[in-house]
Amino acid sequence: MRDFVRLLALMRPQAGWMALAVLLSAVTSLSHAGLMAASGWFITAAALAGAAGAVMNPFTASAAIRAFALLRTAARYGERIIGHEATLKFVAHLRPWFFAHLVPLAPAALEDQHSGDLLARLKTDIDRLEFAFLRILSPLLAALLAVVVVVAFAAAYDAAIALALAGLLLVAGVGLPVLAHRLGAGPARRLARDTGAFEAALVDHLEGRAELDIYDPENRHRARLDAASDALLTDERWLAGLAAATSAGVGMTGQLALLAVLLLGAPLVLAGQLAGAELPMLALMALAAFDAVAPLPLALQTLPATLASARRLFTLMDRPPPVPERGVFRPVPAAGALVFSQVGLTYAGAGRPALDGIDLALVPGRHVAVVGPSGSGKSSLVALALRFRAPDAGTITFAGADVAAFEPDGLRRRIAVLAQAEHLFAETLLDNLRIADPQASLARCEQACATAAILPFVASEPDGFSTFVGAHGAGLSGGEARRLALARTLLKDAPILILDEPTEGLDPETERRVMDAVLDAARERAVLLITHRPAGLDRMDEILVLEAGRIVARGTPAEILPRFGRPPG
Ligand SMILES: Nc1ncnc2c1ncn2[C@@H]1O[C@H](COP(=O)(O)OP(=O)(O)OP(=O)(O)O)[C@@H](O)[C@H]1O
C-alpha cells in the first residue's frame, strides 16, 4: 500500500492531465452505452410504430445516435492523446529521477547490484510503472464513474433491473478481477522478481562465455538459464491464459446482464409499467456497460507486478548514499595536501576494520608508496581518498579543511586515479583517452601515451587513435589495456595522482621504463603508488607497509626496502 501511495505521489505533477484522461475515458464508455441504448430504443420504437401503423418522428432519435457516435469517437481520441501525453510526461520524469538517485549511490552502495539487474530496473521496472496509470488507475476510475451513471439511469426505470445490473457489473468488475488477481498474484510477483535476475544471469553468461567454454563444456550454466527461462515462460503463459479466461468471463457476464434485463423487463412491459422500446434500450445499454469494466481484470492482474517493480525501485532509492552528495559545500581549492589522520574504516558486517589508525599525507611534489599483501586495505584507502566512502574514525582533510566540507565531485576533480580494474569503453583509443579530458589536444594525448609506453602500439595500428578497443577493451592485450588506462590517468590534470598497480601485466624492463617516465612527469604532483612490485619504489619519498589495515612499518626506501629480500607485498 505504501508503495502504491508513493507511486501516486510520483504521478502528482501530471494529476491534471490524468484526471482529464479518466474523465474522457468514462465519457467514451458512457457514449458507447448511450449509442447502444438510443439505437435499441430507435429500432424498436420504429418497428412498434410500423406495426401499429402510426407515424414516428425519426429525427430526434437519429440525432441522438449521431451525437453519441461522434462523442464516443472524439472522447476516445482525446482520451488516447491526453492519457499517453500524461504517461509520457510521467516517464520522462521517472527515468531521470531514478537515474539521479542512482548516481550518488555508485559505486560503494551498489556493490551488491549486478549491472544486468540494474539495467532491468531501469528498463523493465520503469516500463511497468509507465503503465500504472494507463492500465490500472485510469480503467479503474473511469469504470467507477461510468458504472455509477449507467446504474443510476437504469434505476430511473426500475429498481430491480438496476440492482441486477449493478450485481452483475460487480461480478465482472470486482469478482472476476479479484479472482484473477488471486490466481495470478504468485506468477506475476515471480515474473517481476525473476525477470531482473534472469536478465542479470544472461548478461553474466554472455560476459563469461570464454570461461564457460573452458570450464563448462557440459553447458550446466546454460541449462540453469534455460530452466529459469522456462519458469518465466510458464508464468507468462499462465497469466495470458488467465487474462483470456477473465476477458471471456466479463463477456459472458455482459450477456447474462442482457438476459436478466429482458427477463425482468418483459413482465413490466406486459404490465404497461415500461414502454416497449425502453426494454431493448435498457438491455443494450446494460450489455454496453460491460465495456467499461472489461479492462479491470487485466488491471488487477497487472497490479502485483507493478507494485513489485515499484518496491524494487523504491528499495534502491531509499539506500542512503555513502557520502552526502548534496548540501552546502565550500569551493574546492585548486591544490593542497590530502591528509589522513588516524583514519579507520569498517565495512558493514565485517569482523575487523579494513583500515585502522592510518596517518598518511599526500603533499604536492611528494611521492608515497603503500605496499602490503592482498586484503591489507590498499584499495580501501583509494575509496576513502575519492570520497566513495567516508571514514568511520579519524579525519581526512584537503588543503587544511575536512573533505566533508567539499562537494565529492569537486574533490574528485583534484585527484587522478588509475584504479586496479579500469573500465575501458567500447569506443576508440582516443575516445577512451579523452574521457579524462575532452579538450585534450592530440599532442597531449600522444605525450601521455608516450609516457605510458603505449604510443608505439597506437602508431602501429592502421587506424591509429581511431582504433576501436572493443567491449571492455577486448581488442587489446592486458598490458596494452593497462597502459592505455595509465595514459588516460596521466591526461587528467589533477594535483594528486593515485596509481594502483600501474604496471600490472608489463614485463620488468617496460615496467621500469614506464615507472621512471610516469614519476618524472608527475614530479610536481602528490603521488600515491600502490604496488606489490619493486619498480619505482626506490624513487619514493616514503614507503608505508600495510598489514591487515594497519601501518606496520614506514620510512624511506633505504630504510624499508632492505627489509624485503624480495619484492614487497
Ligand atoms: N565492499 C566491501 N565490503 C566488505 N568488505 C570489504 C569490501 N571491500 C573490501 N573489503 C574487505 O576489506 C579488506 C581490505 O580490502 P581492500 O580491497 O582494501 O584490500 P587490498 O589491499 O586493496 O587488496 P588487493 O591487493 O587484493 O586489492 C579485505 O579484508 C576485504 O575483504
Image (tube, helix red, strand yellow):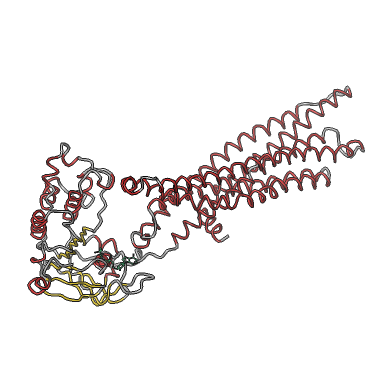
Ligand 1 lies in quarter: bottom left
Q: How many marks?
A: 0
Tell me if I can see residue 86 in this picture: no
State which quarter of the image contains the C terminus.
bottom left
Judge whether 290 appears above or below 126 on screen.
above
Residue in front for this viewpoint, 518 or 127: 518
Instruction: From the top left corner, tell me how far across and down residue 439 is, in percent.
Output: 19, 48
Q: Is residue 452 left or right of residue 407?
A: left
* Residue occupying the point 11% across, 73% down: 563
Q: Is residue 110 left or right of residue 385?
A: right
Residue in front for this viewpoint, 270 or 386: 386
In the figure, residue 373 lies in which quadrant? bottom left
In the figure, residue 371 lies in which quadrant? bottom left
Tell me if I can see residue 393 in this picture: yes
Judge whether 463 appears above or below 360 on screen.
above
State which quarter of the image contains the N terminus.
bottom right
Q: Is residue 93 left or right of residue 326?
A: right
Instruction: From the top left corner, tell me how far across and down residue 12 is, in percent.
Output: 52, 54
Instruction: From the top left corner, tell me how far across and down residue 153 is, in percent.
Output: 77, 43
* Residue occupying the point 31% across, 47% down: 214
Instruction: From the top left corner, tell me how far across and down residue 503 is, in percent.
Output: 16, 57
